[in-house]
Image (cartoon, coloured by chain):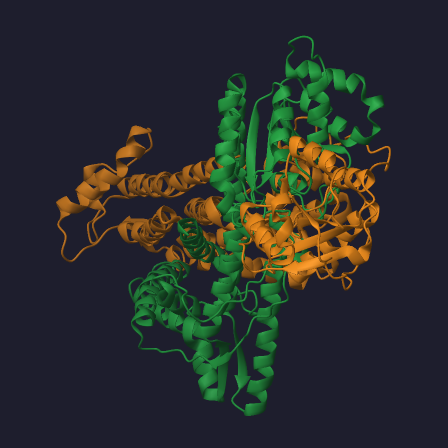
Amino acid sequence: MNKNSLSVAVVGHANAGKTSLMRTLLRDTEFGDVADQAGTTRHVEGSALVIDESNSLALFDTPGLEDSIRLQHILSRYFTDKSVDGIERLHYFLAHIADYPEFEQEAKVLRALLSSDLIFYVIDLREPVLGKYRDELQILSYAAKPIIPVLNFTAQGGDNLAQWKAQLARLNFHALVSFDNVHFNFSDEIKIYQKMQTLLADKESLLQKFIVQRQCQWEERFHAASEIVANLFIESACVRFKTANTDQEVEQTTLKLQQVVRKAENRAVRQLLKLYQFRKEDLANSQLPVEQDGWQLDLFSVDNLQEFGIKLTSDIAKGAGLGVAIDLVTAGMTLGAAAFTGGVAGALWGVKKRYYEEIEAKIKGCRYIALNDVTLQVLWLRQLKLLDLFQKRGHASFDKIDYQVSNSGHLLPKNWSKWLRQLRSHPNWSSLNKNMREAEDSKRQLFADKISSEIVNGLTKL
Amino acid sequence: MSLFQQRLLAEGVRTVEGDYPTLDSPSLGKAGAEFETLLLQRAQHLDGQLQISGLFSHFKALTKKLFILLSVLVLLLGASSVQQLFFSEQGTQINFFWAFVLFFIPNLFALFFWLLLFLHPRLLSGGWLARLSLFLLKTVEKRLNPQSTQHAHFWALYRCYFKINLSGAIGRYQLSYMTHLLWLSYFCGATLMLVIMLATHQVDFIWQTSILSLNDFQGLTQLLAYIPDLLGLAVPTPEQIQQSHLGAVSGLVDAQNSRLVWSSLLISSLLIYGLLPRFLLLLLMEFLLTKKKRKFSLNFSNPYYVQLRLQLVPNVTSLGISDPDSSQKNAFAPGRYSAIAGAQLPSSFYPVAIELSAAQLIECTKHVTQYAPDNIKYLKHICDFQSQQFLLNELLTIESQAIVLYVSLSRVPDRGLLAFINSLTQVTAQPFYLLLMDNGQMQAAQASQRHSDWYTLAAQANIMLENVIQFKSNQYPEGR
């Protein structure tokens, strides 16, 4: 490793969650082997978190310390005739490892300890404080390296927390951190790096840079994810399919609509999985319960009138502009009259552009099928739940991600109804419809940004 | 290829790839390179395969051709409007101020309208003008170039190209550039035609009014003539202005002079107040457009780029295995065992609790009290080296029928525990029982795995599998 880099040995008892910690910090579901049994990791394997082109934070996963009681006994028998530091005992043991073939795994851990700048000691908080753990801590202290005890499985092992804290304090380990690999919390990860800053004063600025970088990456990913969800919501709320007003046609169109929306949701979920670097198999099979509803445009709703008013004004302006263009062609002979006519034409064009399809459908006896409010609520809540689960999921977790929502206790954004009315006034914003206008992309993007910010703010408060 | 074109190409690649990067990234010179550098390199590399830049060059040429075509049409329009308005009859008179108004008021309106849209960026680039331009380009492309649409991603790339060039800040300047170019063409056509017509026709310049006074017109003309006069161009004197009033009589020599100065004023006004401002605005828009193109940046917060960054500038690098496992010797290697019906506990046994929590120890004590009350005094909790050694020594002296080891089912048996239990079974010939304490809170799969682990340990420590007994208790909490 580069001399400017930091190296950390991740150690602990067998099955304490060392490899899981590595996976979570590296955001890598494929790192090492994870299994619910002892002796899964049998070698020292490293990965580095890049800080910049010349600096990195190297993390080394180690085998579990499985027989610390006997190891500590062996170490304590050395140099009985003179006073030596623990590190000499470790070096002596490693120099004579050939005499202890059964401690091959422990030797690997000790070598990793001695070659690293810092040690993460992973504790399975579900475990009571046993003699073997006390011996492990004693052995680690021999390495004369800063140690950060990392408390794993905090959700299930809360009862043992006080006992562990007291024990760690007795051995002068005060810089402990709670970090649950399954119920991941990004702020806990940052606390680990902050503790490292405290213990490694000469690397403080480097670690600060690293912390800022990690936070940027985290926020960037969160924003990108919220953008995916916002876009899905817009796509789904704006989609509408025209159909003849017969039962058979309505049924067929409804089926088509359901397929299209489900496909869009699956696509968004795939994007999120890729973004968060989770596996496809992590998802529980869950299909959006799409309901159909014939959405009718309410010409007299306040929002529509407002929208209509705004459009009308701007179209008059455009129409007047067109009038000027007509005046130009006739070299000004019709100035005034053409501008006025243009204004009227512009207003009519605005009406036609916005409501032509509805009026045409009405005349031809057709109707539009769109997602109803309930379906959109479900879609919204599912995506929010999924995003929240992704944000709080460690990369070592094997639990299936179930983002099905029940119909109670969920809060919708306060602008929900307004959003829906606005979105339904813009069927051309959904690429699921055929007539999406690229040129209006900027307005759509602004709306997506608004929804995305709402998602970020909403989930951050949770 | 300029930086703008390279970035445009990267957007083209994004358009082809869709939601996230799907194409293989070639090996790029990565050492310390910025993400954008790598991204642009990747785009250039993939361009060979996707043929995007060729298509973009085609779109650029198409735009240029359309601009030229429109400019020529507007130039002809300007020329024809001059001819039709002022020179439709031989020996006619030109009402100077009406001529001026016809040229400049529409221009002024259009300029004001453009300014209004220009100051409201989204109106110009996201509205009807952009759509009109797109429509024209699409129509031309469909009608005149059917072969080019054979490219698999033609229309997607078409949308991508024109979305960038006709929307946002670039679109704002691009469309403004086009507007001024067209007006410039119009004025060029009009001025040229005016010069030609005035050179080949004799016209008298007059002014007329019903409500304005002579002084008003004199003032207006002098105001209009101020800049041409400063530039040394011939402009009408107050007398000539007075003489040009409809119905005023002037001599032949004066009439010729008057025609000359009024023609000079009309042409110079057209140049100075019509053509020149549009030309300057055109230059300004070109400058701003170039500047904007140089500043054009990709939106790296887009989910596609966030993922591509992870690919091109990974924030994790593997360091590999540094201390490999060379031997499986002494490993605690769990096999697959299913729980079997255990034997009954012997009537008398020596109880040993191994690595239990406080709650489990209470349960263990209760159990011993119930099944071997006489031996409760022997119950030991083994959880460190000293207690292990004490037990090993004591086992040499005890006379019980059997030894029952109380362990927690949820605890993962490890090599240290195996070594200790092995040493126990070697120290005495008494039968050993392994009593697995289960609080029933483990999930089925996990419980099954753990049973298998303990059976493996029993087998490796020479404890008969029938002597592995389940002890279910719901008394102690989840923990271990």
Which image quadrant for residue B468? bottom right
Task: Specify whether B213 is left or right of B68.
Answer: left
On the image, the x and y values in percent for residue A373 come to: 43, 73
x 76%, y 36%: residue: B27
A61 up-or-down from B197: above or below: above
A10 up-or-down from B469: above or below: above
Q: Foreground residue, B286 or B296? A: B296
Res. A47 visible in picture? no
On the image, the x and y values in percent for residue A262 come to: 59, 69
On the image, the x and y values in percent for residue A126 come to: 57, 46
Q: Foreground residue, A124 or A133? A: A133
Which image quadrant for residue B231? top left
Q: Foreground residue, A20 or B93? A: A20
Quarter of the image where the N terminus of chain A is located = top right
Task: Specify whether B178 is left or right of B256.
Answer: right
Which image quadrant for residue B24? top right
A204 up-or-down from B409: above or below: above
Q: Foreground residue, A115 or B161? A: A115
Identify by letter the chain in orange.
B
Task: Specify whether A291 is left or right of B88.
Answer: right
x 68%, y 20%: residue: A76
On the image, the x and y values in percent for residue B192 come to: 46, 45
Count up the numbered dots.
0
Q: Colour of chain A?
A: green
Res. A246 visible in picture? yes
